[in-house]
Amino acid sequence: MNTAEVLVAGLETEGVEYVFGLPGEENEATMFALRDSDVTFVPVRHEQGAAFMADVWGRLTGDAGVCLSTLGPGATNLLTGVADANLDKAPLVAITGQGGLESLHKESHQTLDVVDMFTPVTKWNAQISDPGIVHESVRKAFKTAEYEKPGATHLELPEDVAYEDCEVEPMESRRRVRRPEPDVPSVDEVRDLLADADRPLVIAGNGAVRTDASENLRSFAENYDLPVAATYMGKGAVSDDDERSLLTLDSGDHEEASDAIDSADLVITVGYDIAEHDPADWNPSGGTTIVHLDSEPAEVYEHYNPDVEVVSDIAAAVRELDACCEEIDADFESDWYDDLREHILADVTAVPDEDDSFTVEGVLPILRDAMDSEDVLLSDVGSHKMTIAQNFVTYEPNTCIISNGLASMGISVPGGLAADLAVDSNVVAATGDGGFMMNAAEIETATRIGCGYTILLFNDDEYGLITEEQVEHRGEHFGTELQNPDFQTFAESFGIEAYRPDDWDELESVLETAVGSDEMSLVEVVIE
């Protein structure tokens, strides 16, 4: 085999099902190796879309999604999606082509230092400069991408090395590296804090849904009647149907979850990453007593300086806390947050009046009724994302996918494709008109490979979130207005069903039809 064939054989050994990408001259050897493999190559319309697909695949499955490009502009187009995966802690392996080694020491056509370019947005990346290292490089790329905290890795394969004869065999994939059990002294410190607490509260972060910690967290909250507020990326760690859920850190138009944190005398964060949500929002004085449970130590930050850090396997740490409370016969105050939860639920489940104009807030309860608890809602970035993150009631882990690390626009249409491939449930990709147009071409990719999911398009003819912020800061806005195509006709040109409901009753009927269908569809909601 040549080097490219061994690389692809390594992908097979790692259990890769799909590679999302674009062909190019410099990755030709890899392309034909993929053709002759058990891995399905999905040609996309833009490399950014490929990276977003790999990103969402990694978020939903826990296995590294794989994206592929050629050198130069292909690699630069991948960069945003790779960075998004890295900051969202989604396992991803990016593979790029490169010119021959003999040309890399001088200025050459389309040649950039891609390895150097990917360094800030990956956990690890390398050039495969010799056929004898390809097996180790592939194994390291997947091992590094997938262990906690997961993220992105990158491999560059020069075209001359790709064609060289290769005598090594792919390395066998091994069980994923796990963090150890929590250390006894740290657990003892937490036990002492819990023994003195009357109103402990839990903040569930991305790590609580990314690992298998959710089941243990639900047990812990239930056993001791603990309120749980989630970050945007921690939604579903505890079901919002649970009477202990305070939804997200800032749900609805009110700040009840923040009020609960103000009233709490101990905050336990589970899998919390400050890139998700600035602690200054809920700990402005820096005086909150905090326990940090995560697979890595806390970032050093004035507003997040935990009293105790338990660095271990997250699920094991929560299990130990559950046992801790039993040892100290914990008797925390109960019902102190009930009114706060009632206010939150009343806000986020309010059904619009018949003559109300369409709003994102009004659509979400209707969308929730049209979706099963296991169905997946994937949000793009914009003003609608903030409303979805705060208001969409979520029942299971990893069923409301919010990008809140890099928070890049354009993720939902390509991400919906990956989600449809990754899960058996129905998928809804929610987007604004701005984010939709960035990667709308991937509708063609989705229809070509037979995907079926619903695109829910909120159209306000502007970059609405930026308009809101400019108006808040300056009383006016500039540079945010858009002129859009006829989205219904646009969608139908790809051969998919498209709807533009005129009232709430029609919207309810359309969503029930579209979400439950196995076909691609677009539902446009005009926001006035």
Image (tube, rainbow, N blue to C red):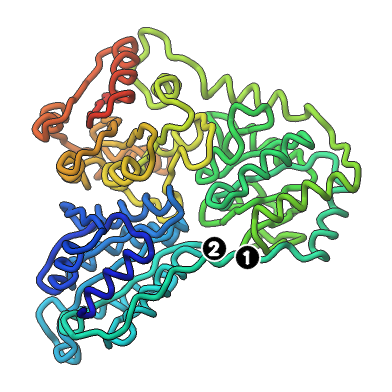
Identified by mark 2, the residue type is Glu
Q: For the point 44% across and 59% down, which residue is it?
A: 87
Q: Residues within 10 Å of mark 2 (few under 14, many from 20)?
A: many
Q: Amino acid at mark 1?
A: Arg
Q: Locate the C terminus and report the quarter of the image it occupies.
A: top left
Proximity of marks 1 and 2: CB atoms separated by less than 8 Å: yes
Q: Is residue 23 left or right of residue 115?
A: left
Q: Quadrant of residue 19?
A: bottom left
Q: Find disc 2 in the rendering and name its residue.
A: 148
Could you say whether the residue bearing mark 2 is in a helix, strand or loop?
loop
Please tell me whether mark 1 sits on a helix, a strand or a loop. loop
Write the residue at 69% across / 31% down.
244
| Residue at image point 33% right, 70% down | 10
Real-space Cα separation, disc 1 to disc 2, in angstroms: 8 Å
The image shows residue 496 at horizontal and vertical percentages of 16, 30
Quadrant housing the N terminus: bottom left
Q: Residue 481's x, y, as percent?
A: 23, 38
Image height check: is 130 above or below 186? Answer: below
Disc number for residue 179? 1
Whichever of labels 1 and 2 marks the residue nearer the N terminus, that label is 2
